Image (spheres, rainbow, N blue to C red):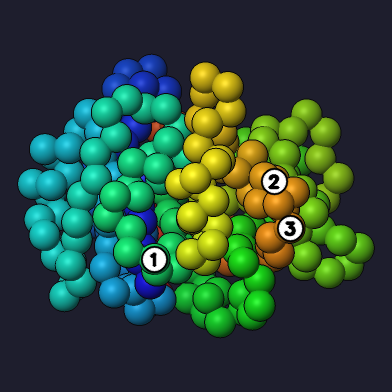
Amino acid sequence: MLGIILAGGNGTRFAGKGCCKPLLQINGKYLIEYALDNLISMKVDKALVVVGKYEADIKAALGDSYRGVEIGYAVQDAPMGCIHALYCALPYWKGETVLLFLGDEIFCDFDATAVSKIGDADFACGYTVAENEESVKENYSIYCAGKSNRLVRCEEKATIVHNNKKGTGFCIFNSACIRLLKERYAYAGDHFVSLSDYMNNLIADGKKGLAIEIAREEININTTQKLQYAKKLFGKRTEK
């Protein structure tokens, strides 16, 4: 399996100025290290970090290995979204299953057994159970068939949500899904499709997707308030 962490953004929405969010520190660890720890817990063979404006900073901080796992790098020349970043990683893809993480997202009580739950599905998106509707709207909504976990549709930043499933940046894609991205799904007109668009395209193409509850809580570190909340939350966990 290949773990891919997307860390090519400019961080322009954070505190009204640009910053390298993956290198923000939460209780003595870089934010991106939490994603690397999760990949290691899932026994990846290699981690590939997609970098952009802050390429030099991230490479200097992480080097070429982390806890014995090799780290490689792909470059995203412009911050054009998650699927463009994933597309930039394809030259380094060797046909493996891909585990996707965002470099500015952190999980509380992450479930490292997610891969074993995918069964005969082609891909899976991770979700958390949100406390309120507004939290779901920050990411994307997940809709399943009846009471099953069979994915029917994802909706980016939905104006109306019908359940408390909050989609996250953690996803699993088998080789057939990545191949379709490479061949057909990267562009939608002049723009790269979003992560939810990509998964909707896969469903329309007959690929089986699952929604898997992946953690107790997800925090996308896009404000100073959320950074402080994560520090407080993980500080309490460390004390235990």
Query: Which residue is denoted by mark 1 in the rendering?
Result: 95
Q: Looking at the image, is mark 3 or mark 2 earlier in the sequence?
A: 2
Could you tell me which secondary element the residue under label 1 belongs to?
A: loop
Task: Name above or below for residue 48 compared with residue 9.
Answer: below
The amino acid marked with disc number 2 is Asn
Relative image position of residue 135 (x, y in whole percent): 66, 41
The amino acid marked with disc number 3 is Gly
Task: Kindly give the residue lying farthest to the right in the view shown.
Answer: 146
Q: CA distance from mark 3 to mark 2?
A: 10 Å
Query: Which residue is denoted by mark 3 in the rendering?
Result: 206
**Mark identifier at residue 231:** none
Residue 207 makes an appearance in the image: yes
Q: CA distance from mark 1 to mark 2?
A: 22 Å
Q: Residue at x 48, y 76 (%)?
A: 112
Q: Looking at the image, is mark 3 or mark 1 earlier in the sequence?
A: 1
Count neighbours of disc 1 (C-alpha within 10 A) and say few if under 14, some if 14 to 19, many if 20 or more. Answer: some
Q: Residue at x 61, y 58 (%)?
A: 125
Q: CA distance from mark 3 to mark 1?
A: 20 Å
Could you tell me which secondary element the residue under label 3 belongs to?
A: loop
Query: Which residue is denoted by mark 2 in the rendering?
Result: 200
Task: Name above or below for residue 43 compared with residue 101.
Answer: below
Q: Residue at x 60, y 63 (%)?
A: 123
